[in-house]
Amino acid sequence: MGLCTGFRWSSGSILAGIALLPAIASAQEAPAEPKRPAIITSTPQAPRPLDEDPGAFISFGLENDLFANTDRGYTNGFRFAYTSSETGTPDWLATAARAFPLFPDAAPIRSTLSFGQNLYTPKDISLRDPDPNDRPYAAWLYGGAAVLADSGDRLDRLELQIGVVGPYAIGEQVQNTVHGIIGSEKAHGWKHQLNNEPGVLLSYERTWRSLYAAAPLGIGFDLSPYLGATVGNVLTQASAGATVRLGYDLPADYGPPRIRPSVPGSDFFIPTSGFSWYLFASVEGRAVARNIFLDGNTFEDSPHVTKNPLVGDLQLGIAVQVDDLRIAYTHVYRTQEFEEQKDHFSQYGAFTLSWRF
């Protein structure tokens, strides 16, 4: 979107009642929560606390092409999230999460509830009849629920998102209201957006934190690879990547949170000191079987382009933690997502704020 759209808001109603996992009946008393092993995370190298973390978190993420001085493609996304403490997770939810075969048997469990919106536009938003060879107008309004198992050096995450694509996602209202307030050009082609369609996404990711850790010249360094997969009518893909961090008193986190299709980091962080910072760089590759924002609607004709099945991201950024606050900025370079795309790559910035309480 245009200048200053980094402070958008959504006036739409938010999805509610996300079913997370089926309840698992048990006549036995739930076992005590296990303790995670200590790991090397800071400089000088110090272990994170062994006890379950009592902190809960509220996070806000904003991704916008404003930071790259463009107004096209993936033009805006926001996400609000609440993440529970490890000590506050209900026994039934922890038991249900550990029943998932890819989760570790002994790891504290958190849960996350989130909602957000993504907006996509073609390159020329002044056209009332958009270029059929450019990506279509589209919006995605969703709610999500996730469970996370953090064993100290590994994070497993299972998330369900339910939402809607099309006019019900109020993309036109949000974009043009904000553009009108700030005096930017309104987008004229929203009548050609994707049709209304309910959407479901089920995602699983695993990150290995500090697979390699060192402290060259007194500065902390670590490497964290990750794998992920998503299935659904909105997005179906497999992803793999790695993140390197270089900084001081590296906190126990898995990188700043991100909005899909990127593999997310973590909304939570466990400080090892009152102040820390780190620079980070990530590379990520995705094999994409379906992307509704390029392929068009699932069950009816709609605008569409020819997606590229392989997409890559380069992410560069900085994160700063002060006491119970973490602020991060990520700049993303993304390879061509569809064959008709004229730019060799697209770019946007992501700002995230997480508060521990």
Image: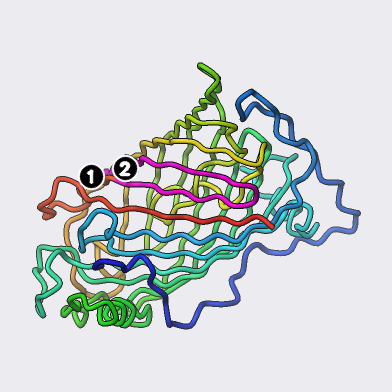
Rendering quarter of residue 199: bottom left
Using the image, determine if residue 204 lies above or below residue 142: above
Using the image, determine if residue 11 lies above or below residue 216: below
- 66 left or right of 252? left
What segment is highlighted magenta in the picture? 310-332
Label 1 neighbour load within 10 Å: few <14, some 14-19, many 20+? some
Disc 1 residue type (three-letter): Thr
Task: Check if mark 1's residue and mark 2's residue have beta carbons within 8 Å.
Answer: yes
Secondary structure under tag 1 reads strand
Which label was assigned to residue 42? none
Main secondary structure found in the magenta portion: strand
Task: Pick the quarter of the image with the C terminus.
Answer: bottom right
x and y, in percent, of residue 161 in the image: 50, 64
Q: Residue at x 20, y 83 (%)?
A: 191
Q: CA distance from mark 1 to mark 2?
A: 7 Å
Q: Residue tagged by mark 1?
A: 335
x and y, in percent, of residue 80 in the image: 52, 65
Secondary structure under tag 2 reads strand
Rendering quarter of residue 37: top right
Label 2 neighbour load within 10 Å: few <14, some 14-19, many 20+? many
Q: Is residue 312 magenta?
A: yes
Q: Residue at x 36, y 73 (%)?
A: 165
x and y, in percent, of residue 108 in the image: 73, 45
Task: Pick the quarter of the image with the N terminus.
Answer: bottom left
Q: Is residue 324 magenta?
A: yes
**Colouring chosen for the image of the structure:** rainbow
Q: Residue tagged by mark 2?
A: 313
> Of marks 1 and 2, which one's residue comes earlier in the chain?
2
Q: Residue at x 52, y 27 (%)?
A: 222
